[in-house]
Image: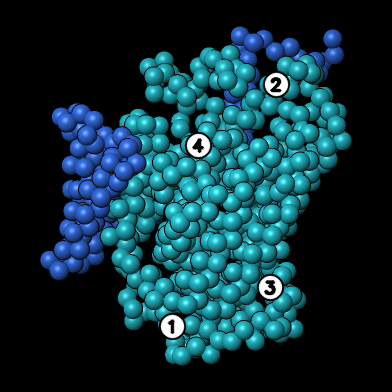
Amino acid sequence: MARTQVTIDFETSHLIFPTIIATVLTLLFLTIVIRDRSRIAGSGAYWRQTFASMDKVRFFGTLVLTLIYFWLMVPVGNMWPNTGMGFLICSVPYVFAVGLLYLHERSLRNMIPVAIMAAVAPPLAWWLFSYIFFLSLP
Amino acid sequence: MFEFITPLFCLLIIGGTFLGIIFGSIPGLTATMAVAVCLPLTFPLGLENGLALLLGLYVGGISGGLVPAVLLGIPGTPSSITTTFDGFPMAASGEGEKALRIGIVSSFVGGLISLGILFAFAPTLARFAIEFSYVEKFLIILFALTVMAALSKDLLLGIFSGVLGIFLSLIGRYDISDGGNGKMRLVPQEWDYYLDNGFSLLPVLIGLFGLAAILEQAEIGVPKGHSREDLKVGGESTFSFGIFRNQAGNLARSSFIGTFVGILPGVGGSAASLLGYSNAKTFSKHPQTFGKGEPAGIVASESANNGLTGGALVPLLSLGIPGDATTAILVGAFTLQGIQVGPLFIGNNPDTWNAMIIAMLLANVAMFMMMYIAIRHMALVVTVPKHILFPIILMMCVVGAYTINYGIMFDVWTLLIFGILGWLMVKLRLEVAPFIIGFILGPSSEVYFVKSLESFGDLTIFFTKSWIAVVLWILIIGSLVGSFYMSRRNADQNASGRAVG
């Protein structure tokens, strides 16, 4: 049997390609680590600079609000099953809070359009997807 | 033959193009994001109508980028970077409207030329590709990934990104319908329930192109929108079509360059417009005027980036390989409707193929009409405040991720995971385009690779199956060697530049 000949065992065939790809990925990773070792060694300064220059309130605020939004949608939706209420009830404050977070001058005048948008957009999306497109929402 | 042309079909093209122009016009939003966010809307619309909406978004999104590029000097999309070079100086000297009209006409011509090439070339390529066996199909994917990686900013990181995309696509069950053994891999046992089919494509796309883009904007503080006073539209237009009298060569060349770049898998619009612009400068009789308000620069940039639209659809519809990130999302639209794109697509779905051509044509016409006639009003879309748009986009991301598989909450978490991953990838200088195309093509490449070995039982089959396989290997090696040589040359030039400095 020539060295290039291979027999595929059907029972383990699901592992062949992932093993090859994982090996290639590891080799590439090691090559990158060796090539960019000085840059990687100095990456602490890069990340410090990234975090120093970032708008932490807006960045982490987006992440935290989104996490809470995702987290609450299902339990709230379970109170009124199969109605999409979890999406609707959670989206209104989420859209309003993110809008406020991104607003630069938080005067009452500037907050009114944000509030109108939060009051209109989620119910519109809920109505469109639930009643027109018949798609399920949380 | 053309039963799909209904009032709804036309309305979706017009609406999609309009929405696409808005996305393209607002820096930070892209055509890719527009298509990703609106993808779930196509679910109940059916394939033809859904594609009408998405192609309108695509053409509008690519074209809209020229508005802020000219009026603010900020590219609305990466593909309009070179439009700023001459568009903004023209606007600064009171010729904003003229510069916009030059860009719109060039975009229109570029879009039509690329559409013509798509119409002529894709069916021929598909007929040729029908003959391909698993071996050639696997090598085509390998070639696509190496071309993408070779044209990345960093060859090694480009390849790594593509392979990482393939690796993550293999998570889950080796599907029996693909000829697999139905066993799970790469998943901890407690996650079996969630990852039975791996990460769903559409939440991954929406996360990478929707949430990640907004996180990038949040990181820089969601820059304040622009007011009407910031827009340098200028006085009465002095535009006339006579400007194009000496630009026919430039227009045709740049459109062809854009289309060709589009055909190369995973290469974005910025490469198309840069290549078109640098060629126009090289062939110009007065290259010194480029960058100072030269109309030829806008012609080259805009015809090249719109040339990309038709070109990027060629490999998608003939080989099943997306030409760029936006067309990668179109794969999702086909998946939603249960249709597989590949060599058999055009022959088996002539109505859908016709619908796509007509939709692209109408989207280009709609874009031209909207932007050319109502240019002063369209320019105002740049002023739409981000604090109004972004929360709605985030909410639509959730709707899209949740509804795509009939209501699975894990898909919403997938959206968050890949949104954060997309943000991190930019920080780590990894390339999103090779990653996503690797993710899309990963499962097919596995099937083609394993089936090739099962059928022939010899590794040499990948080199000896046919002359096409040999040609593909030459192209694969050529693209890698060429890229390596270019990166070395650039490194040497940078080093000598620093030494001189």
Cβ atoms under marks 1 and 4 closer than 8 Å:
no
**Residue B33: x, y in percent?**
44, 52
Which residue is drawn at the image coordinates 69% and 54% (left, top)?
B119
Location of mark 1 (residue): B233
> Camera-side residue: B138 or B241?
B241
| Residue underneath mark 2 | B451
Whether discs 2 and 4 lie on one chain: the answer is: yes
Quickly name the residue at label 4: B337
| Residues marked 4 and 3, same chain | yes
How many marks the image carries: the answer is 4
Marked residue chain, label 4: B
Q: Which of marks 4 and 1 precedes in the sequence?
A: 1
Q: Mark 4 belongs to which amino acid?
A: Gln
Q: Quadrant of residue A31?
A: top right
**How far across and down, in percent of the image, does residue B416 sit?**
36, 39
Cα gap from disc 2 to disc 4, whole angstroms: 26 Å
Type of amino acid at the residue the image marks with label 1: Val
Are callouts 1 and 3 both on one chain?
yes
Considering only vertical position in the picture, is B385 above or below B398?
below
Q: Secondary structure at mark 4?
A: loop
Q: Is residue B165 visible?
A: no
- Using the numbered discs, state the Cα–Cα distance from disc 2 to disc 1 in whole angstroms: 59 Å
Q: Quadrant of the C terminus of chain B?
A: bottom right
Q: Colour of chain A?
A: blue
**Whole-Å distance between the Cαs marked 1 and 3?**
24 Å
Residue B51 locus on image (x, y percent): 51, 49
Q: Do marks 2 and 3 share a subunit?
A: yes
